[in-house]
Amino acid sequence: MYEVDERDCVVELKDLPQSSVGAPIPHMLADENRVVVAYYIEETRSSQDWTYVPSMSPQSFDELIAVVRFTGCASHMFGPPNDEAFRGHPLAGRGLHPYGVFRIEDSSWIRKLERMNSVHPYHRPETFWKRQHLIFSFHDSTFECVCDGFDVRRMRGSIAGIVTDMVKLLEWDRS
């Protein structure tokens, strides 16, 4: 994890697909430059009864799925905190909360990566200035990355059924 300072600013990205609050079951594939994350989307329910959360698994069929491809990834983390321990995240007091997608402006993590790279003889700090620090907070985990960009696709099916599509998004299959 990284340490934050007074400059980190949390901005919620409300136009991205809301992860399932019950079981988004996020899956990640990565190489050195790209990361692909897929998760079940929270579908609008006709009833506002949130006491019932359907049972989900990677094999759950005919579900809405968000597939997010991150390009130019400098670094990523996938793990804690979950929704019950989210107050332990260093940005929780600045508007970061469970079940959301966020961009961190003036990110301490990006600044730390830039300082770490500054010993390179051809270091160019401006390459770090265009990068984004993004956070996807799920039910049982949190995904964070520093990247140049990302795109989002919506699919229907199962997480297990779209793994081949995720591999193609990493551009391993160039044929």
Image (cartoon, rainbow, N blue to C red):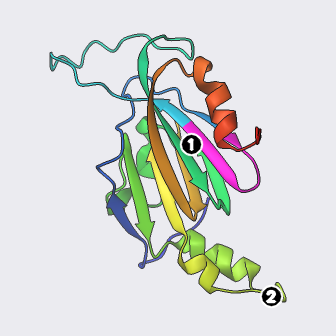
Residue 20's quadrant in the figure? Answer: top left
**Residue 11 part of the magenta segment:** no
Quadrant holding the C terminus: top right
**Residue 7 image position (x, y, % from top left):** 42, 79
The answer to which of 84 and 163 lies nearer the viewer is 163
The amino acid marked with disc number 1 is Pro
Residue sitting at 68 percent across and 82 percent down?
115
Number of labels in the image equals 2
Residue 122's quadrant in the figure? Answer: bottom right
Residue linked to disc 2:
122
The amino acid marked with disc number 2 is Tyr
The answer to which of 65 and 5 lies nearer the viewer is 65
Secondary structure state at the residue bearing disc 2: loop
Mark nearer the N terminus (2 vs 1): 1
**Residue 49 image position (x, y, % from top left):** 18, 16
Classify mark 1: residues with Cα within 10 Å, few (<14), some (14-19) or many (20+): some
Residue range in magenta is 29-37
Residue linked to disc 1:
80
**Residue 125 image position (x, y, % from top left):** 65, 86
Looking at the image, residue 73 sits to the left or right of residue 131; the answer is right
The answer to which of 94 and 164 lies nearer the viewer is 164
- Position of residue 129 relative to residue 50, above or below, is below
Task: Evaluate whether residue 140 shows in this view.
Answer: no
Task: Evaluate whether residue 58 shows in this view.
Answer: yes
**Residue 33 part of the magenta segment:** yes
SS majority, magenta: strand
- Position of residue 54 relative to residue 26, above or below, is above
Secondary structure state at the residue bearing disc 1: loop
Classify mark 2: residues with Cα within 10 Å, few (<14), some (14-19) or many (20+): few
